[in-house]
Image (tube, rainbow, N blue to C red):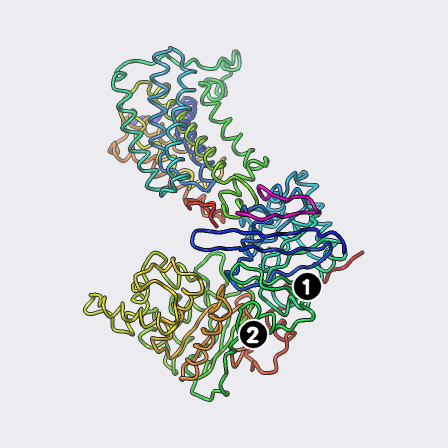
Amino acid sequence: MTEPLLKITGLTKAYPGVVANDDVSFAIQPGEIHALLGENGAGKSTLVKMVYGLVKPDSGQMELHGIGYEPVNPSAARQLGVAMVFQHFSLFDALSVAENIALGMENPPSPRELSGRIRDVSEEYGLPLEPHQIVGDLSAGERQRVEIIRCLLQNPKLLIMDEPTSVLTPQEVEILFKTLRQLKEEGTSILYISHKLEEIRSLCDHATILRLGRNVGECVPAETTARDMAEMMVGSALHTPERKDEPTGEVLLELSDLTAASPNPFGTTLKGVGFAVRAGEILGIGGVAGNGQDELLATISGETRVTSGTITLRGQPIGHLGPNARRSLGVLAAPEERLGHAAAPAMSLTENALLSGAIREGLLTRGFINWRGSRRFAQRIIDAFDVRTPGTETSAQALSGGNLQKFVIGREILQRPDVLVVNQPTWGVDASAAAAIRQALLDLAAGGAAVVVISQDLDELMEISNRFAALNEGRLSDVRDTAGLTVDQIGLMMGGAHDMEVAHVH
Amino acid sequence: MDFSAINPVLLIASLMVAATPIMLAAIGELVVEKAGVLNLGVEGMMIVGAVAGFVTAFETGSPILGFIMAAIGGALLSLVFAFLTQFVLANQVASGLALTLFGLGLSALIGQDYVGVKPPPTPKVNFGALADIPVIGPILFGHDLVVYLGLGIVAGTWAFLKYSRAGLILKAVGENHDAAHALGYKVVRVRILAIMFGGACAGLGGAFISLIRVPQWTEGMTAGAGWIALALVVFASWKPWRVLIGAYLYGGITVLQLNAQAAGARIPVEYLSMSPYLITILVLVFMSADRSRAPAALGKIFHASN
C-alpha cells in the first residue's frame, strides 16, 4: 500500500458545550475521492476546517505526505497544496471573477495573465467562465465554477469540497462529477463532504462516516447500499414517510398568469406563473435557488400583492389582500430564511408564535396581547413537533437550525391552514427531523389542506409531492404527476444545465 | 443686487479651499466604509484634529507639525472607535455617535486656553512664475500644501482601490467578511488600519479649518462638516472621484452664497446658508441613481467564531 496523502490520527476539537470532533482518524490515498459522510452537526465541517487551517485542533495529529502537518492558517494550507471549495460560497458579489480568484491565491500574477490562465483552466476542465463578469450576476453553478477554478489554479494535491452539489441541477452535477473524475485521473485527491448517498455511491472510492463527532465506520460506497450508509449515519433504522392515495378534492388555491416584479433589485420577476392545487394535494416546486422561489412564496403569502384575480382561494380573488387578511382566510406560509423572515431571531418562541398565530389562534383582544394563550400555543408547537428547547421563553436564534425549522413549520401547521406554502422545509435539518417534517406535511394534506412545497431537494419533492413543477428564471414549467418522472425530465423542466458544457480534453 | 462684484477666478480658487476639509474627511470615511465599517464619529475626529493641529501649531510655531499632530490626533481618537467595534463588538452606529460627542467635549476641554489667539500662518506653496499666469495661476497654483495633499489623497485612494492588491483585500473585507476570513485575510487588522486612515484624514480636514480656513480656535467650529462628509460618501456611491466632485460642488455653493450675501441678494440669509447642503445632496442623489451600492458588509459586526 502506498503512503497516504493525508493521515489524520485522533483529531479532537471541543467547543463550549459540544465536542465537535472526538478522536477522529482516517487516511486519504493519493488520487482517491474520499467521502466524509454524516448528518448535520456530525462534525464534518469542523473536521475539514481543521484540515484547511481555519480551526486549530485541541489534540491529535495530521500528516501530509508523511510529514507532520499543522497549518496555522488557510494560506499555509494552500501553500502545502490543500485547497477548499466552500459550502456557502466564499465569494464577493461586487467583485469580478478575476478579482475573486486573485483573492484566493498566494501570489496572483498580473490581471491580464490571470485572465488568460482562468480561460485556459476553464477550457481544460469544461467550466466556462468569463473573467471580467461580476460575480453577483452569476448563477449558483457558475459561482461554484469560480471557486473550483480558484482552487485548480494552485495545482492542489488535496481538494476539499463541502456539499458541492446542494445548489446544482442534475445536469450540472454530472458535469461537476466529470471534472472531479478528471482531477482524480491526474492524481489529485478529493475529500468530498455530503449527505447525499447516491452521489457518494457513484463518485467516491472510500467513505468515512461521522456521527456526533465520532468516526463510526468506513465503507466502500460502491459496495454498500444507500440504506446501510444512512443507518450508519443516523445510528438507527430510518422511518420513511408514507404517502396516501391520489387526491380528488376541490381546487383550493389557483394562480393564473401571475406576473410580479421582485421587491429585491437582484431578485427574479415571476412571469406568467399558473397552477392549481386541490384539497389533499401536495404540489412540489423545484428549481435551482434564485429562480423565483422567494418571490413565489411572497405572492402566495401576501407579502407581495398582485392583481386580485390572479390568485384565488376557492374561486374567490385574494391577490390584493395582505398577509394578515390571507391568514384569516386560511392561507399560511413558512418562508425559507428561518432567522429574520420566518422567525424574529432575538424574540422568544412565545413572541414568535404570537407573531404569526395572533389572528387564527385569537391571541389578541382589542389590541392587547393574550400572553398566557401565546405561551400555551408555543408550548403546543414544542410538544407536537418535538422542538428541543429549554422552554417557550428561549430566543429563536438560540435554537439549532433543525429545531427552529420544526418550530416554524409546526407553528403554521397547528393553525389548521387550508393552504400552506413552505419554502425549503428541511434545509439544514438532520435526517430524522426532516422525515418528521415531511410526515407532518403529508398528514396536513391528508387532512384536506392544499400544500405547496418549494424545495431544492429533488428527492424530497419526489417523496412527498403528488405533482411536480419547476421554476426557471421566474417561469413555471408544466405541472406533471410525480409518479414516473425521470431525472432527465426533471432536469429539462429545471431549465437544463445553464449553458454548461461537458468537459472536453484536448 | 450686484453679481458683477463676484469674481469667477477668485470664486473657483476659494471654492477649492472651502471644499478641502469635507473632501479630506469624506475620502477617509470612504475607505473606512469600503472596509465595511460605518464610523459616524467623523465630526468628532475632525474637531479633535482641529484642536490638536491648532494647539501644536500655536505652541511650536510650525503649521506643518500642526497638521501632522492633527492626523495623529484624529487617528488616536478613531482607535477608541476601533477598540469598541472590533474587539468589544459594540454597535457601530452607537459607538460612532458617542465618538462625536466625546470628540466635541474633549476638544472643548483642550482648547479652553486657546480661544482668541491666532495660529502661525500656513505658507502657500511657491510655484514661482506659474502663479502669475492669468486665470489658471490663481486657480491652480495659489494654494496651501494641504489643498494639493487632499487632491493627492483622492487620486491615491482611487488608484489604491482600483489597482492594488491591498485595495482589493480591503474591498473584499467590506464586501463579505466571513469569506475574507475563510480565505485567511485578517479582517480585524484591515478594518483597524482603515479606521485609523479615516481618523487621520478627518483630523487633517479639521486642522485645515482651524489653521487655514478660519484660522482660529472656537468650540464646535467644524459645525457639521463631518456630517456633510458622511452624507457625501453615500451620495458619491463610494467612488473617490465623485467625492471630489461633491465636495467641490458643496464648496462652490458655500462660496457663492457668501458672495451673494455680500452682494446683498434679496433672499433671506437662512435660505442661502442652507443652500450648499440642499443642492449638494440633491445633485448627488441624482448621481447615485445608477447600479452601484454600498459595501455588502457595511456596519455588520464581524466575529471569527463561525
Left or right of A66? Residue B150 is left
- Span colored in magenta: A57-74
Where residue A203 sits in the image (x, y, percent)? 68, 65
Please state, as top left, top right, bottom left or bottom right, where the N terminus of chain A lies in the image: bottom right
Judge depth for marks 2 and 1 and give the one in front: 1
Q: Mark 1 — on which chain does it sit?
A: A
| Mark 1 Cα-neighbour bin, 10 Å: few <14, some 14–19, many ≥20 | many
Where residue B118 sits in the image (x, y, percent)? 31, 13
Cα separation between marks 2 and 1? 33 Å
In this rendered view, identify the residue nearer to me: A78 or B129: A78
Residue found at x 56% / y 43%:
B184
In this rendered view, identify the residue nearer to me: A407 or A176: A407
Residue found at x 45% / y 19%:
B143
Image: A197 above or below A135: below
Image: A463 above or below A197: below
Q: Amino acid at mark 2?
A: Ser
In this rendered view, identify the residue nearer to me: A323 or A407: A407
Q: Amino acid at mark 1?
A: Cys
| Mark 2 Cα-neighbour bin, 10 Å: few <14, some 14–19, many ≥20 | many
Between disc 2 and disc 1, whose residue precedes?
A: 1
Residue to which mark 1 is pinned: A204
On residue A21, the disc is none
Q: Residue A131 magenta-drawn?
A: no
Q: Quadrant of residue B26?
A: top left
Label 2 element class: loop
Q: Mark 2 — on which chain does it sit?
A: A
The reply to whether the C-beta atoms of the residues labelled 2 and 1 are less than 8 Å apart is: no
Residue to which mark 2 is pinned: A477
